[in-house]
Image (cartoon, rainbow, N blue to C red):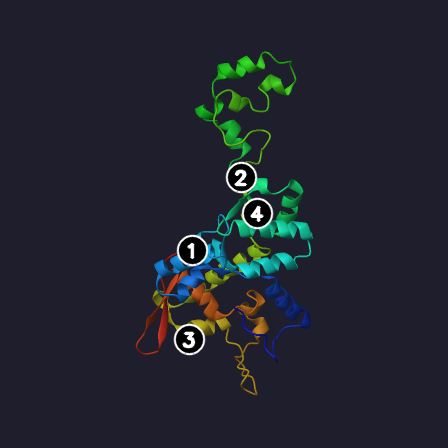
Amino acid sequence: MFTPLPERAAGMSSTRIAEVLNFRRALPPIVTVAHVHALLNSPTATEKEIVELMREGVVRKIVVPGRGTGVGEGLVLVKEWERVVMENKELGEEIKQALLHHLRTNSTALTLPQSLFTPTDATSLLHAGFLTSSTQSWTTTDVYSQPSPSLLGTLTSLSRTATTAASGTLAAVGGQNAIHNSGGNVGTNLTNPTGASDEFHLTLPTTGAYLRLLTSARSHLLSLLSKSPYREAPLSLLRERWDGGVADPARNQRRATDVLPGRTRKWRVFFGLEFEWVLAECVGAGLMELFETGSVGLGVRGTGKRG
């Protein structure tokens, strides 16, 4: 996934080198489903194999809502997932064992019910990055400014409830569940104003950083390809653009046009991400495809699909 750090002429300070190594070390052991599809020829056979490995408890699928099918779906070896849980220093031993128990019991589940965890344990797991919760995409403006007839019920039922209560109390406006009690149909009530789902999504710490790195790397490689006419280029040229024209370590002397690795976007922004890894992500996601040029080896073309 990452290029080894240059042994000399890196163009990076010791502080920056430490930042690169720490960033790499903190990333979760995830491989995207798109990357797996890039390595195998048959999408159907690949999906069947993934399902079989999930049933056998070898791998788990991780889905990040809102990230799209290509980016937000990943695979993690179960033994690696359990290792990350056990090595976490923020969680107590009881919480770790409880989480591992639920993971083993629900080997193919993408989410876990909130009822499996106490509020204290859930908060700890959320803060540690092993669970995420999703909320409904509505605002108070949507609910109170433009209510639908089904949400409001009837004005008669609301007024009948309110007129029997003392002025200035919550009951005077219908109580906590006024909309529900009056016949309305709404997903949340005033006791749950955020509209939180009753399930937690399984995830790993720093998954967000991994997805941001992946997304930005895909976009950058697409922008490099777009510099060529018709969004086509030889594979060697695209690799050179990604590497940024760095100095060849095999030569004893640098040329005037050589660039130190630490000054390239590959190292400044992407922490030394390998060209082949990003290319596989783009091919697996359907953003690029390879073809034989017949004269200069393999070529790369954009499919027109947006990342």
According to the picture, the residue beneath numbered tag 1 turns out to be 51
Q: Are marks 2 and 3 in contact (CB under 8 Å)?
A: no
Residue 20 vs residue 59: left or right?
Answer: right
Q: Are marks 1 and 2 in contact (CB under 8 Å)?
A: no
Tell us which disc is closer to us: 3 or 1. Answer: 1
Q: Are marks 2 and 4 in contact (CB under 8 Å)?
A: no
Q: Earlier in the sequence, mark 2 or mark 4?
A: 4
Residue 304 pos. (x, y %): 36, 58
According to the picture, the residue beneath numbered tag 4 turns out to be 132
Label 1: which secondary element = helix
Residue at 46% across, 61% down: 218
Real-space Cα separation, disc 2 to disc 3, in angstroms: 48 Å
Residue 229 pos. (x, y %): 36, 67
Is 187 situated above or below 149? below
Q: Dot 3: few (<14), some (14–19), or many (≥20) neighbours within 10 Å?
A: some
According to the picture, the residue beneath numbered tag 3 turns out to be 236
Q: Dot 1: few (<14), some (14–19), or many (≥20) neighbours within 10 Å?
A: some
Q: Earlier in the sequence, mark 3 or mark 1?
A: 1
